[in-house]
Image (tube, helix red, strand yellow):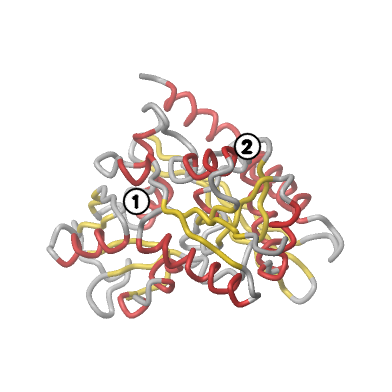
């Protein structure tokens, strides 16, 4: 970076967003770079009274409810980098922007938070599970149709307060968020594939920049984790090929086995009280194969197993007033 240049980093104001940003900022400062942080409020932060899926038909809603204002600040030059939870970032990055780096990924799975020893299997009938994610809702209903799912929005600390106040019997949250907030002791069960699939790019953070800002890109290069970046490229390519947005009930998980990349993904559809799913899991052809190629292959396998029709029906229903 030029002498005296300060990298202005944008973040949402939630405790989790600030924790993620603080980790990135600490590493940049460790490289001897000057960094300032600007907090920016997004639509998703303001409209906590509506389930995320319910924001689709509202002004500024749909995919990107947690990132759009940060991206606008990037394009306007107010900030030089924006730190996002990658699962919130639409696969179509706006023209003029790019993902500058993907630091090391932490736990990619969802977790159950409840009484000690509690699991999805041990919950009593009619227990109340708190979550607003469509992907999580359909998976809970598929595994335990006798449970009651209650929409709960808000930051992690807000949801935990609602649990502790008795508004539900347990929560389903991203394990990464609890880890980053130092709250891993609240986890009572980890929900892993193939029984329970995480969101695309869950557990990963992206630092987004202006595509033409070569200086900032070079500064971020030391923070990039090659394995994490390859995994999320495969997952996001699968999501994009399926034409599924951040809010679609699609789960995916890519990981390296030696020098090979493995990607599994699933699409869910709830119709008439029952849940259907299509799943596929493939390995990359070779270590040199682009991660995106693996994502496209898995998406094609899912489409052959009925996922394309399922997503089409869901989009048709979502477009109805």
Callout 2: SS? loop
Q: Are there few (<14), some (14-19), or many (20+) residues within 10 Å of tag 1?
A: some
Report whether 131 appears left or right of 10: left
Q: Nearer the viewer, residue 147 or 253?
A: 253
Q: Earlier in the sequence, mark 1 or mark 2?
A: 2
Q: Could you tell me how many numbered marks the image carries?
A: 2
Between 314 and 216, which is closer to the camera in this rendering?
A: 216
Q: Residues within 10 Å of mark 2 (few under 14, many from 20)?
A: some
Q: Which residue is mark 2?
A: 94
Q: In this orientation, does residue 1 appear?
A: no
Residue 63 drawn at (x, y percent): 49, 38
- Location of residue 117 in the rendering, given as x and y in whole percent from the top left corner: 28, 79
Query: Percent x, y for residue 239?
Result: 61, 45
**Mark 1 = which residue?**
141
**SS for tag 1?**
helix
Q: Please name the residue shown 73% across and 56% down the image.
A: 215
């Amino acid at each position: 970076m030029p002498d005296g240049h300060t990298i202005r980093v944008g973040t949402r104001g939630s405790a989790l967003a600030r924790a993620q940003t603080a980790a990135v900022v600490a590493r940049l400062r460790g490289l001897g770079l000057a960094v300032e942080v600007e907090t920016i409020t997004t639509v998703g932060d303001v409209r906590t009274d509506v389930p995320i899926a319910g924001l689709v038909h509202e002004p500024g809603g749909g995919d990107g409810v947690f990132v759009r204002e940060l991206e606008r600040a990037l394009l306007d030059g107010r900030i030089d980098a924006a730190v996002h939870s990658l699962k919130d970032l639409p696969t179509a990055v706006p023209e003029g922007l790019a993902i500058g780096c993907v630091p090391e990924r932490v736990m990619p799975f969802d977790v159950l938070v409840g009484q000690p020893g509690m699991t999805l299997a041990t919950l009593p009938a009619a227990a109340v599970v708190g979550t607003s994610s469509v992907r999580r809702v359909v998976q809970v209903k598929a595994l335990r149709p006798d449970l009651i799912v209650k929409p709960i929005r808000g930051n992690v600390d807000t949801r935990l307060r609602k649990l502790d106040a008795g508004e539900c019997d347990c929560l389903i949250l991203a394990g990464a968020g609890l880890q980053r907030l130092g709250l891993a002791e609240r986890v009572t069960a980890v929900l892993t594939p193939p029984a329970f699939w995480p969101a695309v790019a869950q557990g990963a953070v992206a630092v987004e920049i202006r595509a033409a800002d070569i200086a900032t890109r070079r500064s971020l290069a030391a923070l990039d984790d090659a394995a994490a970046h390859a995994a999320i490229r495969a997952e996001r390519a699968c999501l994009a090929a399926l034409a599924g947005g951040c809010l679609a009930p699609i789960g995916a998980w890519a990981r390296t086995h030696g020098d090979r990349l493995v990607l599994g993904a699933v699409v869910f559809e709830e119709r008439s009280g029952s849940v259907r799913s299509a799943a596929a899991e493939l390995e990359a052809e070779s270590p040199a194969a682009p991660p995106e190629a693996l994502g496209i292959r898995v998406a094609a396998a899912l489409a052959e197993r009925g996922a394309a029709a399922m997503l089409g029906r869901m989009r048709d229903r979502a477009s109805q007033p």
